[in-house]
Image: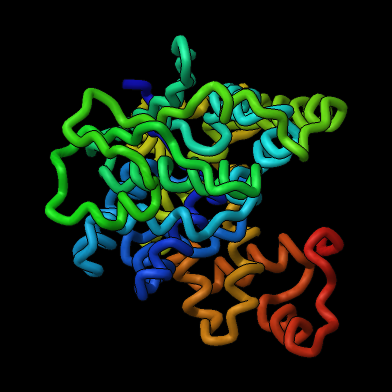
Amino acid sequence: MSNTERTTSSSWANAIIQALELEGLDGRQLFSELQLDPLLLKDPDARIPQDQMTRLWQRAVVQSGNPAIGLNMARVIRPAHFNVVAFSLMSSSSLREGFMRIVRYQRIIGEAADIALQPLPDRYRLELAIHGDTLPAAAQSHDAVMAYAIAFCRWMTGQQLIPLEASFTYPQPADTSAYAALFGCPLLFGAPRYSLTFSRDVMEAPLATGNAALAQAHDRLAGEYLARFEHSRVTHQARQVLCRLLPQGEPKRLAVAGALRMSTRTLQRRLQEEGNSFQQLLDETRRELALQYLGQPQLTLLEVAYLLGFADPSNFFRAFKRWFGMPPGQYREQLKAGTAPKIDEVT
């Protein structure tokens, strides 16, 4: 196991939330119950710990009573759920080429997923494994990826594609009707792997949306995104830990390092390598959250101060004036009047 936790992109987490809401659940409430800030879902660069996504699926199954709830992902198809990878995928010349791009850029969508495309004599098999950190990944995580994959293929081709086979590692459920309705192919439970198998004709058929020039441009964008993600991985993860810990008081370096499964010295070194420091990151995180919280009128200034981890509200007021040149109350009044400066104009 690596010394930092695996994460899922906020884009994919958004898709999961939408799938849960199709079951009548309050996805964002479930998110909050796991002490995850729903505002992370609005940040395209945010990452969600894989174990928390596992807990999200577990709660969803308990509340819905539907162990096949992951199949709802087939009903929430949006290119944005794949982040920048979607554009590269959509300009691919064939499904085969598109799946190869998913394999190449899968870490952007989620670090916990291990996807492989296996060429066989007369078919291709898309194999999937999702790894947890301290918790085994939920079966619903695998169902969700497989459901989304077949639905996206149908959306891309405009055809009701039917796989040759869909396989699952868990025992056959009592009711397989939802699986049969979605995949429309032979189902294999208790299999050695999760997989979808397609004929070569289906996988190699030209796509109407294929465009080599666009695919090359989108590959470059996806490669740059992946490079930025790899370069600033600890900064992103530490920021998420800070968001989670701030409502409990000012987080200590030791607590953040512990959450990331590294020593405080390693945390400081990794942050320095990414051009940051713990104190600078704490200050920036509080600064960004302050503006988000002040935009929620139901929160009092005292509540905002405590949510930002300030034990003494006067320290929050001084910090806000240092950040933005005005007291938080004045900024909120300007916000209500529609005269507040844009975030990037506030100094």
Judging from the image, the colouring scheme is rainbow
Q: How many marks?
A: 0
Residue 282 visible, this orientation: no
Where residue 247 appears, x then y in whole percent? 41, 63
Residue 207 visible, this orientation: yes
Q: Residue at x 38, y 29 (%)?
A: 128
Q: Residue at x 76, y 35 (%)?
A: 91
Instruction: Quarter of the image for the N terminus: give it.
Output: top left
The residue lying toward the viewer, choosing from 143 and 44, is: 143
Where residue 21 appears, x then y in whole percent? 42, 70
- Position of 2 with respect to 312 (left or right) is left
Where residue 60 appears, x then y in whole percent? 28, 62
The residue lying toward the viewer, choosing from 185 and 322, is: 185
Q: Residue furthest bottom?
A: 337
Instruction: Quarter of the image for the C terminus: give it.
Output: bottom right
- Position of 144 with respect to 318 (left or right) is left
Where residue 18 appears, x then y in whole percent? 48, 64
Q: Which quarter of the picture shows residue 211?
A: top right
Q: Residue furthest top?
A: 121
- Position of 45 with respect to 217 (left or right) is left
Q: Residue at x 12, y 53 (%)?
A: 174
Q: Residue at x 81, y 77 (%)?
A: 340
